[in-house]
Every structure is written in C-alpha cells, then in structure tokens.
Amino acid sequence: MSIFIIAEIGINHNGDLDITKKLIDVAKNAGADAVKFQKRTIDVVYTKDLLDSPRESPWGTTQREQKEGLELSIEEYKEIDRYCLEKDIAWFASAWDLDSQKLLRQFDCKYNKVASAMLVYEPLLKMIAEEKKHTFISSGMSDIADLDRAVEIFKKAGCSYEIMHCVSTYPMDDGDANLNRIKTLRERYDCNIGYSGHEVGLAVSYAAAALGITSLERHITLNRSMYGSDQSASVEPAGFTMLVGAVRKIENAMGDGSLDVNPKEISIAKKLRAHIPL
C-alpha cells in the first residue's frame, strides 16, 4: 500500500483564496494525494477576553481581527471544493469545534482528521466517528490514556481510522522526533500508523517513510517567511516536490525483505564467480 501523502495547508493560506489555490497547485504538481485545511468557529474556540486582547497582524490590532482574518468563509470552501474537483485532488479539514464539523458535512469529503489539540474533545470525536469516514488521528500532546479513549470511540462507532505519530512543537527539533514511537503505536493498537511532521527539513520524514508509515502529513507554504505561526514548520514548493519524490523512491526501495537472490544478480554471479571451482 502506497503512503498517503497529505499537504497540510492549514491556515497558511492567510485567508486569501488566491494563495489557497496556489498551494493546492503545489500539492497537486508534487504528487500529493490530498490537501488539508483547519476550520474553527472563532467565538466557540476562543474566549471573549482573548479575542478582545491586542495583537498586531495584517488584519488589525486585536486577536479577533487576526483570527477572523485567517478563516475562510463557507463560500470560499465551496470554491475550494470546486477547484480541488477540477484539479483531481482530495481535500478535507480538521474541525476544532462541533459547529465547524457540522459545516464540513455539506461537502462530500472522503476523509476526516482529528487534530492533536482536539484528541481529548470526546463530543467532537464521537461526531466525527459517526460519519464513518476514514479518519487520521494525530497523537501530539497526548498520552496513552488519551489515545486509548479516542481509539475506543472510533472502534465502537465502526469508523475506519489510523493514528499519526506527531510531536506538536512548531518547528520540532529533530531530537524530539522519537520515530521509534511509530513501531510502539503499531504494536499497541494493531492499526495503520502515519506521521504528521513539524520539523524543518525533510530527513526525519524520509526516516518515517522507511519505518513503514501508511500516511505522511507535512505543512506546505509558498514561502516560509510569510506571516503565520505555522510557516516556519512548513515546506516550500521545491522542498515538497522533493519530499514526495523521495518518499515514493523509499517505498519502492523497501522491498519485501526476502532473503532470496535477486534474479538480476544470477548472471552477474556466474560471470564474477567463473574462476571458482564448484
């Protein structure tokens, strides 16, 4: 089974539909399987005190203006839906509240995503699981008890899922990757395990691919110097194209582990061993 590669646009579109379409093009041209967004209902996810507090941004001087500036409207999601259909690439989003998940239901998305921050929000998990769409569950910021509860919800609902090993620091230090946790998760939950990376560079993602992950998610951006909290942990277009190409090569190189001689070696062995008495 080929690794399912997700280009995480998240909020790196900065509320701009033109940037959004360019990022979708980046994902499609690189060979990704899907693009993913994040959807929030601002007044539900954040407190009034926080929204009224000061914050300088391209959209104004308050937290509310900044966070509303990063959100896409329902009409813009309709255009994303149309554009992804035109480009023949799947899209889906991670909802951060119940209203956002309800909003996403009007689209015929094939997948769901549980963001690491939402893993402990059981009402949202139950709402997602009842849709019975294949769901990617990120494990960042969470312990075994959190994961056990989430997995039980999806099992009880009969909803297909896979866990994505994730470390929720932005950007993540390579030394914090703990990639061997991929094997531990696979052994504990007996399910497919993916990797959602927030590191700078590509090497850690290559290593994850070699550990047998079934999905790989990386944030993408047009330019890492753009405004936004996720930009520094994102991959630019050339790097993302390199990532997808290398992951496909790694998949091809892994093989089945057989100890048999490769048939292509037989004629070479006869030539190079011709002087040895047998």
Image (tube, helix red, strand yellow):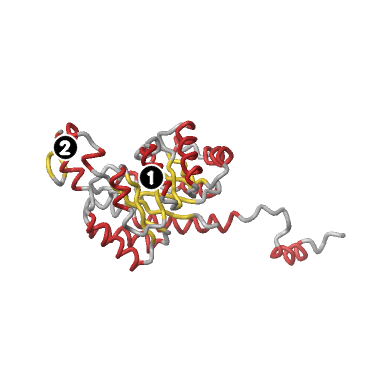
Residue 260: x and y in percent read: 73, 56
Which residue of the protein is positioned furthest toward the left in this rendering?
61
Q: Distance between the residues labelled 1 and 2?
A: 33 Å
Name the amino acid type tagged 1: Met
Identify the residue at horizontal 14%, vertical 35% (top origin).
Answer: 52
- Where, quadrant-wise, is the N terminus in this rendering? bottom right
Name the amino acid type tagged 2: Arg
Res. 173 in view: no
Q: Are marks 1 and 2 in contact (CB under 8 Å)?
A: no
Residues packed near mark 1 inside 10 Å, few (<14), some (14 to 19) or many (20 plus): some
Eye-nearest disc, 1 or 2: 1
* Callout 2 secondary element: strand
Residues packed near mark 2 inside 10 Å, few (<14), some (14 to 19) or many (20 plus): some
Identify the residue at horizontal 22%, vertical 58% (top origin).
Answer: 75
| Residue to which mark 2 is pinned | 55
Residue 114: x and y in percent read: 39, 44
In this rendering, is residue 269 above or below 40?
A: below
Q: In which quarter of the image is residue 123?
A: top left
Q: In which quarter of the image is residue 29?
A: bottom left
* Horizontal relation, residue 1 to residue 225: left or right: right
Which residue of the protein is positioned furthest toward the bottom in this rendering?
86
Could you tell which of marks 1 and 2 lies nearer the N-terminus?
2
| Residue to which mark 1 is pinned | 127
Identify the residue at horizontal 69%, vertical 54% (top origin).
Answer: 258
Residue 196: x and y in percent read: 43, 45
In this view, the residue in front, 50 or 154, is 154
In this view, the residue in front, 184 or 159, is 159
Res. 185 in view: yes
